[in-house]
Image (cartoon, rainbow, N blue to C red):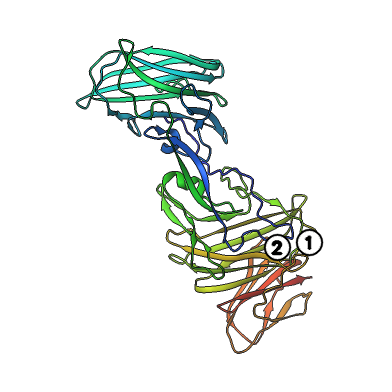
Amino acid sequence: MNRIYTTAIILLSAITVIAQNGEITNGGFESWEDLTMYESPDTWSTSDQIMYYGAPTTSKSTDAADGTYSARIDAVEIEGSLVAGYFYHGTMDQTGPIGGIAYSDNFEAISLQYKTDLNPGDSLYLLMIRYNAGTLVELTITPFAYGTNSAWTPTVIYVGNAIQDELFIGFLMGDPNGGNDPSAGSYAMIDDVTLLSGGVETTDLPNHSFEDWTTTTYESPQSWFTLNGLLAGYGLENANKTTDAYSGSYALEMTTIDAFTDTIASILSFGAIDFSNPTPFESIPYTQSPATFVCRYKYAPANGDIAEIYVEFYEAGVPIGVVYEQLSPASNYMSLVSTVTLAGTPDSVLFYAHSGANPGSVLILDDVNFMGGNVGLEEIIGTDFELYPNPANDHVVIGLPSESSFDIDIVNMEGRSVRRISSVNGVHTVDIQDLDQGVYIVKIFDGTSSTTQKLVVN
């Protein structure tokens, strides 16, 4: 019954993460919300509960033949792959149905009402299996609805009259044996499923008229995209609210987890996340020109792991500035201060952060923001340092305080480190003869905070 062939991670919704003044909305992760993934009719199992891919395929409809609600199933396309809805009473494993719900009344017909809008060649199917003492005694697979039925249509489906103590009953678009898959855009609604013996209703199936539903949600930081919307379908989330905050009440805790025989990093993004695209992180509109990117963080890497933060600004689709940071281990909150150097006026920005490649790595972020330039917040100043000559040709001198030890990192505008020097202080000369002409970022890190300056190489 499972016709979901895509494993792409795709979360589609419209979120604005930038305030009008250019600051990052909810960069302190104080605001959280419960987002609906899907609703399921109580006691029935659904395609969403079995395998959820970011788009519900079974839903509650207020267009009902009996009572207030009916159950709707849809066939949708996600990144070129078919996702078809279904629901059933009983139990299944990866091979298909393996058991039913307890039901011992005799019946020889199933009565229900339906509405459909099925594409040509698509059909709505009933799958019914009787079990007695653990043995399958009757199997019924039958199509019973086709085309468009815009009014509620009653039907009676006659089946056998074998004795059973367990009953599996399900509804889906397309033959459960395969070979007749539905096409995207088809849907069906079903209501008032009853069993008949001699034309008389027997004991009702649980929730036979789909009046009782349960909503499945996941918690998310407002104005951000994470992988929680997908992982929550499997009972997992790896971007969580924590009270271990630098300021305010909450921060964001990002954990790399081991699931589905794979490693899944926690990811934070301004825009939608879709790993079926060459560029999986969507940029969002942004027209300000900040001077600095700042945040506070803690990081507990597993097995020498590395967490990263990447910010890229665009003008008419062309990159005009980048911030790239690899985060070092930190058991206490550290300040990250990175200079933003722009070669134009942005019209959009891309942001993502991830917790690392090894299961067990934990990154905590708080107070993420843009500031300076024409973004109206006071800058956070880290360790100051001298940088000369600037522009430079074959060498640059970096003047550091002598009482501490510093790491120096020179990063190009693609975010790649081109020179890295550890544990220095005082006046230090760096050879840059092999560097191409252009703009670079010099980052100084003292073990608790960092600061940056722009370097121009002639």
Q: Nearer the viewer, residue 30 or 418?
A: 30
Q: Locate residue 176, reporting x and y percent.
A: 41, 23
Q: Residue furthest bottom?
A: 403
Q: Locate residue 215, reporting x and y percent.
A: 46, 41
Picture disc at residue 343: 1
Q: Is residue 269 above or below residue 439?
A: above
Q: Nearer the viewer, residue 146 or 78?
A: 146
The answer to which quarter of the image holds residue 140 is: top left
Q: Which residue is mark 2?
A: 413
Q: Is residue 317 visible?
A: yes
Q: Is residue 306 visible?
A: no
Taking 154 as reference, is 276 left or right? Answer: right
Give the spatial CA distance, label 2 vs label 1.
Answer: 10 Å
Q: Locate residue 73, reporting x and y percent.
A: 49, 28
Q: How dense is the environment of label 1, judged by Cα within 10 Å: few (below 14), some, or many (20 and up)? A: few
Viewer-nearest of discs 2 and 1: 1
Residue at horizontal 59 percent and vertical 42 percent from the top: 12
Question: Between disc 2 and disc 1, whose residue precedes?
Answer: 1
Taking 6 as reference, is 281 left or right? Answer: right
Please state which amino acid type lies under the numbered disc 2. Answer: Met
Question: How many labels were placed on the picture?
Answer: 2
Q: Nearer the viewer, residue 403 or 170?
A: 170
Residue at horizontal 71 percent and vertical 67 percent from the top: 371
Q: Quadrant of the C terminus?
A: bottom right
